[in-house]
Amino acid sequence: MDTQRKPKVGFVPCLTFVKQGVAKPKLERVKPTKVEMKEIVKELRLREAEFNSRPKDEQSTSDHHDEQMSEDDDADMENDVDNYYGLDNYDNDEPDEAGISFDTDALLLNSAPESEDEESEEEAEEFTVKPDDNILVTGQVNEDVCTLQVYVLNTEKQEFFLFNDTYLPSYPVAVEWLDFNPKDSGTRGHYAAVGYMEPEIQVWDLNVADCLEPAFSLGSKKRKGSLRHRDAVMDLSWNVNARNVLASGSADHTVILWDLNELKSVTRLECFEDKIQSLKWHPIEAQTLLTGSCDGVVKLFDCRTPGANKTWVFEGEVERVMWNKFDPMHFFASTEKGMVHHVDVRATKPIWNLNAHTSAVGGLALSSYCKDMLVTGSQDETAKVWDLKDNAPALVTEKKLNIGHIYAISSCPDSPYVFAAGGANPDNHLYVWDIREVEGVFERFNDRLNVVIPDNEMEVSVIQTTTSSTPIQHGESKNEEPTPSTSAAASSSSEQTSVKNRTKKRKNKTKP
C-alpha cells in the first residue's frame, strides 16, 4: 500500500498593491436570497462538473466544451442543489442554523452566523481601512481552495492585517485593480479583475464582504456572439488613461481589449505565435500597449492601428514586461533565463542586458517614486534590489524571502521602499519587504526620491515625500522632460531585434 502523503500545495501566483484612499472604511455585507443562492451554487457545480469531465490534457482550454445541458438535466441539477446544500431551509432564521457551508474540489465557502460577525466598537475601529492605509490584493491557492485575499498595510504605523477574502471558482493566474464602475462611470469603484486557468475574466467588488459571485464578468459563454478567449487568461492590464478599457493576454495566443461600459470585447489582436504571459498599457499614452510572450517576443502596439507593431526578440520565454514610468520611452522585460532587459522603444537593441538571476524572473517592480530602484524576484527563491543609476545596474542587496519560488512582486504606490512578493512555499507564500531594513539602502536612495514624473497630460508634476528612515518591523524574518509619443515607434516600424481566518487586531507582523 502506498502510504506516501501528497505534498502540500500553496502559493501566491499574482498580487497587486492599491493606493491609499480608494477603499471604503467598512465592508458592505450582502446576503443573497434563496433564489440567488440556488443560481450561484448551480453555476459553481456546473463549472466543477465541466472541468472534471475534460481529459487531463484539455483541462485548461474550453474550445470543445460549449455543449448545453438538456432541460431534464437542468431540472435535475436544480433539485440536486436544493437537496445537497439544504437551500430549502436557507431563509429560516432558527438560532441553531449556522448559515451555508459547502465544499467542492474547486471551492470551499463558509458563511458564519451573524452573531459571529458582531464586533465591539473597539474591534470595529481596529478592523477599518484608514485614509493612510494601502491595500494589497492577492490571488492565493491552498490545496484545492482558491481565494482572493485583501490585506490592509500601513507602513508608518507598522500595521498589516487580513481585511477581506473571497473564494474563487478556479486557479487565479492574474489580478489587476481598477476603479471603473460600469453601472455608474461617474463613480469610482474598488474592484479586482481576476484571470484564471479558464477563459472567463471575473471582476470582484473589494468593498463587499463574503462575495459569492463577481460584480461582473467578461468573456462568459452566456454572452453569445461576443469575442472571448479559448484558454487561460495569463495577464490583465487596466488602462488608467482610458478607464473603460481592460486588456487581457491569453494562452490562446491572443490579446483582447474589453470595453467595460458594454462588458464586451471590442478588439482582438492575433499576431502572436505563442502564449501571452505579460502585457502593460503605457502609463501616459492611452493607445500604446506592450506585450510579452512565451516565444521570447515583445511587441509594441498602437491600438489605433493594431496591425502595425514593433518587435524585439529575446532568448527564452518573456515572464514580465513593465514600462519605466520615470522615462516613458523605456521598458523592462524579464525572461525565464534570469535576464532583465532595458529597452528604448526608439532603438532596435536594448540599453542594457542584466543577468539578474539563475532562474526565471517572475517578479519585476520599480519603486513607486525612486527612479533608480528596481526589485526583481525569481524562481531561484531570491529577491534582489538594483541601483540603475547612469544606466549601469548595480546589485545593492539580495535576500532569500523563504517563500519558495517567487512568482510576482508589486511595489507599494505610497511607500517607495516597500514591496510585496508572492511565492510557492506552502506554509509561507506571502512576504512584505521594507528594504529600509537593509543597512545603507535608505542613505543610498533617499536623496533621489523627489523625482519628476510626466503625468497623463504629458505635463510635469513633482512628487514630494517625507519618508522616514525607519523600516517596517518584520519580527522574523535629475528631472525628466516630457518625451515624444512611443506609439510612433510602434506605428512606423515592424523591425525585429535579436537580442478565512480573519485577524481582528492591527498588531500583526508585517510578514504573514
Image (cartoon, helix red, strand yellow):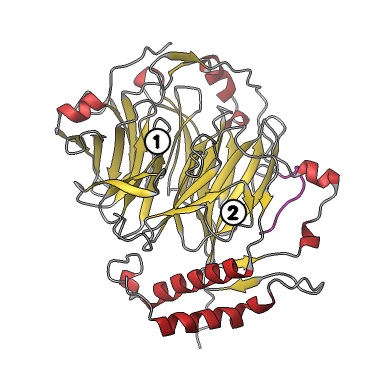
The residue that label 2 is drawn on is: 428
Whether residue 48 can be seen here: yes
Residue 437 horizontal side relative to residue 236, left or right: right
Residue 115 horizontal side relative to residue 452, left or right: right
Residue 511 rendering spot, x and y as whole percentages: 64, 45
Q: Secondary structure at mark 2?
A: loop
Q: Quick check: is 21 in the magenta stretch?
A: no
Q: Residue at x 60, y 35 (%)?
A: 22
Q: Residue at x 58, y 61 (%)?
A: 212
Mark closer to the observer (1, 2): 1
Q: Residue at x 65, y 71 (%)?
A: 101
Q: Which residues are magenta?
A: 500-508
- Where is residue 153, by image quadrant? top right
Q: Secondary structure at mark 1?
A: loop
Residue 247 rendering spot, x and y as whole percentages: 35, 43
Residue 99 rendering spot, x and y as whole percentages: 71, 69
